[in-house]
Amino acid sequence: MAAAQQPADDTVLGLDLDQLGKIEVPQSATITPTSARRVPASVTVVDRQMIRDTGARNLFDLLETFAPGFHYLPHHWEAPHMGMRGLIGDREDKYLIVLNGRVLNEKTHFGALSERDLPMLDDISRIDVVRGPGSVIYGPGAVSMVISIQTESFADNSGDASTVKLGAFEQFQSLELKKVLTFGEDRHGLLLYAGISNYDGADQSNSAMVYGNTLTTAWGDQARAGEAASFAVPNNHEAWRDLAKLKLHADYQYRDFRAWLRYSRGGEQLASEHKVFTTPPMGSATEGTAESAFPVQGVGYQQLTLDLAQRWSLTPTSSLELKGGYESFDYERRFTTPLDVLNARFESHREEEYLLRATYSGHPSETQSLALGAEYVYSRFGLKSPGYPDLEAWSSTLGAIEPWGSSAIGLFGEHQWQWSDTLTQFFGLRADKDDYSEWMWSPRWSLVYAPNEQDTFKSVLSRSVRKNNAEELRKQHLAGQTSAPEELSGLELIYQRAFSPALKLNLSMYYNKAEIFGFESTTLSSTRVADFTYGGAELELGYKTDSVRVDFSHSWTKLRDFNIAPGARQKVSAAAQGFGNDLSNWSSQMTKLAASWQACADWRLSGSVRVFWGYPGAQDMIDYTNAANSGLVSGAYSATASSDPGYEDSTGPATFLDLGAEYRIGRNDHVSLNGYNLLGWLDQKNNKRMYLINVSNYRSEAAALALSYRHAF
């Protein structure tokens, strides 16, 4: 994507508004270069200093702190789920994680999985969260957002350093090492990074697992609705199979050539849904079964990525970039099925990807920019997992897997035309085709109007797509079916006001029409489950000086209408059954405040608060489920979202408060103390995080501390 030199913060603060508006900085929402002011999207930028201020232990909490409309929820059956502007699902295939321009999503089953849970973040230079559709730039899957991570490199690094972190209450230890090697030229060098973490997580006393039903387990224990479970559950965020989390990265640059190699490993254990260990009708377990007979569920991964890129200047105003590489992704999941809870399934498979992409960028005239490109991806699926070398590849959709390969092509382009000093148009189009899918089209048209130095108005009309995961595409293909994509069509209006170089306002309003497709294993087809329209607004205020930074946001999301296909089953909203008019797995209003203060040369203070004002759509789903189970309304019996009468704990407000302090010891050493979810020491309900789909259950995030020591060499 477009890249340009970004001035240092102290230089930026000295510029006037007109100069600020003309600076071209690296962008993740366009292909043609443009200024930050004219980017045709809502983008949250998290830089190195913001990462250090939060003392973040993973991307989940880091992005939830700074990105308006961003939220994440745990899941009993899969890894935790990230959502944006109301869109969140039981797999992570509605958004993309991109690292240095390379999509990292696992494609066989789950989607975005790697990088998110790793507490080692000192290799990251910045993160751009493109809030809203992004398929026109990145292809299928960029429906709700794009998380674009830029790592440090030889040409852009914060220096050699080592960082040690120790966590208490949510226990972990991590070590990071970073070294830059120079080979005699200004743009010729190598950055090496290694990070490792032992993550034990938070036990039940510090991170209560709470179920919404009073129930008796198969082995005779009783859990009461709204109270911490009396039986053993995995530690919250405990590492998968007790394996150390790893991140290794090597980045080489020589002028306009860049190559990087990255390995990451992570994952976590999961607390079981109540249906697994309770007897009928609430669950599927057999009375008298010993507690030790129930397996621990969890998800793990490891990923190896090689990326090569070379850029050539063809003329003073045009260039060509070739990008290619290899990726291997190993996915593992241990889970139980409701009908056979004692025989844990080991879902394990590996995929490989070979990528080649060419992008031409040029300026046909002084007022126009053009980018055209094509990419080819060949993937191999269903390979044996090295994590389980004695097991054959197995998928919950396909069963035992015979390896297969498939190809995908993408054609993309963007035209930027500055009609006048105040008006700029962007038009982009991308077309994607998989061996097993139909053609998928992702257009975007945007107008950006900047009538003066302070005000900017933007309109963005776009459509993004999601194709099925590879295991589902394969099953349909074997049955002679061709998969249709999900689509999201949206309109966004954005107003930006720069009161001064330090104080800025952003207001975004959006209206989307979304589809939900489900895979039906009996008919071997991907069919529409529901479609719905919804909208929302995001208000942001940002203030930044040499010593103070404050970021405030409030976001609101509202469902307009929800239409379910005949006979379809879904857990997105109870509106179709006449209960409320909200999205079930979402907090309709969120408020966030983050601040940092360089109090003096040696002390830096920081803090943040995130308030989720309640989950009315989840309460609607609980009310509908309870009514159906009681025979008051039509509907099949379900224990998934049921609760005891009058229980509403999981759907009420939740508040997360973090505080931190950093002290500089001498010139090269810093020590930091960060506190997380501190209101939990007053009441663990303050820190509750409702479960996706099982919305009557929640887990409290532990009130915790972390001590960090960083030495710059």
Image (cartoon, rainbow, N blue to C red):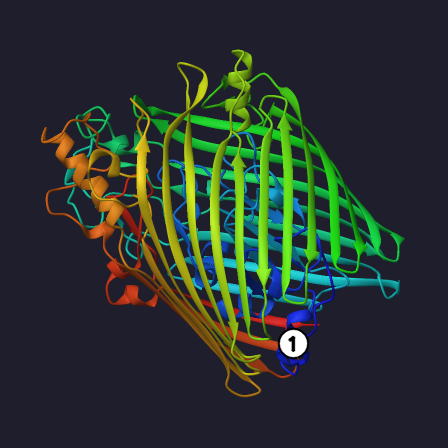
Residue found farthest to the bottom? 600
Left or right side of 327 for 522 = left
Q: Is 467 or 204 nearer to us in this picture? A: 467
Q: Position of residue 539 (x, y in %)?
A: 42, 65
Please indicate whether residue 270 sits to the left or right of residue 647 in the image: right
Question: Secondary structure under badge 1?
Answer: helix
Amino acid type, label 1: Asp
- In depth, the one of 479 and 243 nearer the eye is 479
Question: Mark 1 — residue?
Answer: 18
Q: Nearer the viewer, residue 325 or 534?
A: 534
Question: How far across and how far down the image is residue 391, in percent?
Answer: 54, 23
Answer yes or no: is residue 216 visible: no
At x 60% / y 25%, what residue is drawn?
A: 384
Where, quadrant-wise, is the C terminus in this rendering? bottom right
Q: Is residue 336 visible?
A: yes
The residue furthest top is 479
The vertical placement of 8 against 227, above or below, is below
Of residues 575 and 451, the one drawn nearer to the viewer in this rendering: 451
Q: How many marks?
A: 1
In x, y percent, where is residue 77?
38, 35
Q: Position of residue 442 (x, y in %)?
A: 58, 38
Q: Residues within 10 Å of mark 1 (few under 14, many from 20)?
A: few
